[in-house]
Image (spheres, rainbow, N blue to C red):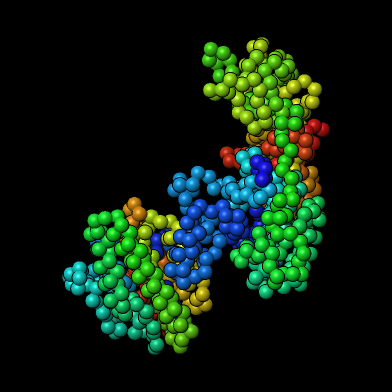
Amino acid sequence: MNNENLKFVIVGHVDHGKSTLIGRLLYDTGSLPEGKIEEIKQICESLGREIEFGYVMDHLEEERDQGITIDTAQTFFNTEKRNYVIIDAPGHVEFVKNMISGASQAEAAVLIVDVEEGVREQTKRHAYILGMLGLSQVIVVVNKMDLINYDQKRFESVKKDILKFLLDISIKPSYVIPISAKKGDFIANKISKMNWYDGPTLLEALDIFKTKESANYKPLRFVVQDIYNFDKRIIVGRVESGVIKKGDKIKILPSGEETRVKSIEEYLKNVTEAEAGKSIGITTEDKLFIDRGNVVIHNGDMPAVTDRIMANVFWMDRTPFKIGERLMFRCSTQEVSCEVEKINRVINSSTLELIAEDATEIKNREVANIVIRTDKPVVVENFNKIEELGRFVLGREDTCAGGIITEPEQ
Amino acid sequence: MIVVLAIDALEYTLVEEFNCKNLKQRFYGKTNIKEFSEPKTMVLWSSFMTGKNMEKEIVARGDKEMWNTELDMEDTFFRSFKNPKIIDLPGFSYIKEQHEQERRMLKYYFDAQSEEEKKNIRTEYNNLAFLHHRRIKQEFSTALQGDYDFVLGYFSVADVIGHLNFGNGSMMKLIYRDLDEIAGTINHTLIVLSDHGMERVGIFGDHSNYGFWSTDLKDLGNPKITDFADMIKEIPEVN
């Protein structure tokens, strides 16, 4: 096994078996804390019922609530090939928020569909979000096959429905796998009851996925969070992409002023460089005016510095947005007031139906292509180039929409 | 058929937290039991079935004797039905030996000196309560298939287990899920009612000073436990 981690999210309709699947994945890979499964089994037996793997997740959540387990928002297991992190996404709003904020970046997704219920509105909405967020590594699992006596015909019918929808949103799943999370069929083990299916198990399919290319290889984007004035002036921030080194010639955006990195400051460490993902401080050779939200880059590969952005947004607030309303645009640590200049089109994220073109409002759970005008220039990127500066949220008092930038400048 | 799922110590906040949809039904809320000086099981269920505050009468019997209360059908609203089935209800058809044994073991637990002894008693106590729960579940399920016009099933598991294990969230969650599934199997007019709820005291649980109700019929607001006798009699199916 190598040391790489693959982060993935399981999405789908609320009762289609997400918790059971997570519990089963942990059980089949021997990742559950010792004695846990026995304890749950015993309570279930006492109540005269069969154990369900969804309870395992309940149990872990309970421990998280009590502070026993440090973090089950990210659940870990491993196969012979590598480590996996399941990112907890209780609902699509949380999922979008997590993905957009960068708190938990999934590299792959498992879309779960109940074979009895088939493709539901929420299934489609979640799939749409996967597409919007650029997640191309997708596996569809058709769950609860045991309840339909492993009927191939029904599986093929659900498979046809989901593939048709995914095709419309340009997602091509790597596999569509019939499973029973409850019984453990085709999660880690194959069973003869489905010998009509000759594809991989879910774990085998996950092992085929690629981990994301390190953001170290992308151009430098060091986003400023704060300035500390001690005996020296330290610019604190996070390296969203690239690598920053002592002595590097750097440019500060949006001002465009240039200087060199005098030192890299990391608490209790003596370092000369910092890679993507690190929160560090830097000092510069020249004293420049730098503020929170500024972006430090190397000369050369420039991001856009613009006040006009075209983007796709997923509206997730009950109060609809109406043209003319002012919102806060937040991208990394940049925060600036903005208005929506134009709503090019609004789409129903479940049916993909075009609701309106040149619209005046966006309602809850609708997706829209919009043009944003910020009050001040911001430093942004096309999402497909550098995700870290290509995703943003729009807010009133709370976040009300998440989006990705499709064209930074017009 | 009208069905009452009488659940001892069903706690409103846990029904919410665990999102027990079947227990909640369309309308649900807390009952008001402030007229009682203490949330005592025997007092509350006796008051429920007679439709009047029975605290004075029951408490006067003393702590031990009160558990022997056995009201006459004629004193309860059950008489409004032609063929009612009342399972294990305190003050009416209570299986005394079972519940006496539970109370005895609870006392042993708190009297026990060593942790080892406490652990063994807890296991035995839990097993006893769960075994009884399985039996009641079976009896209740059979009754639902029967030719009754009123079925009341009293489930004590949340109270009995809760007293020693309320701080064990997973155990309580599984119990609430089980109770929720029981509610989900009922295809008749259903009223879910508890005498009181439960609040956490470390790993233990103590009675809280409100109960739980739910129904699909109408919003009852913040009813008293004594309101249910008349309310049930007024359900059209009874008349």
Answer left or right for A21 relative to A131. left
Location of residue A70 with respect to B10 vertically, above or below:
above
Q: Picture coordinates of residue B76 (x, y %)?
A: 31, 80
- Is residue A6 visible to the viewer in this orientation of the structure? yes
Location of residue A87 with respect to B227 vertically, above or below:
above
Among the 4 quarters of the image, the one containing residue A385? top right
- Which of the two residues, A120 or A156, is positioned nearer the viewer here? A156
- Is residue A355 visible to the viewer in this orientation of the structure? no
Q: Picture coordinates of residue A75 (x, y %)?
A: 58, 48
Q: Residue at x 33, y 59 (%)?
A: B119
Q: Picture coordinates of residue A318 (x, y %)?
A: 61, 50
Among the 4 quarters of the image, the one containing residue A43? bottom left
Q: Residue at x 25, y 68 (%)?
A: B104
Which image quarter is the C terminus of chain B in?
Answer: bottom left
Q: Residue at x 79, y 44 (%)?
A: A344
Among the 4 quarters of the image, the one containing residue B50? bottom left
- Which of the two residues, A191 or A164, is positioned nearer the viewer here? A191
Answer left or right for B168 relative to A252. left
Q: Picture coordinates of residue B58 (x, y %)?
A: 22, 71
Answer left or right for B230 relative to B217. left
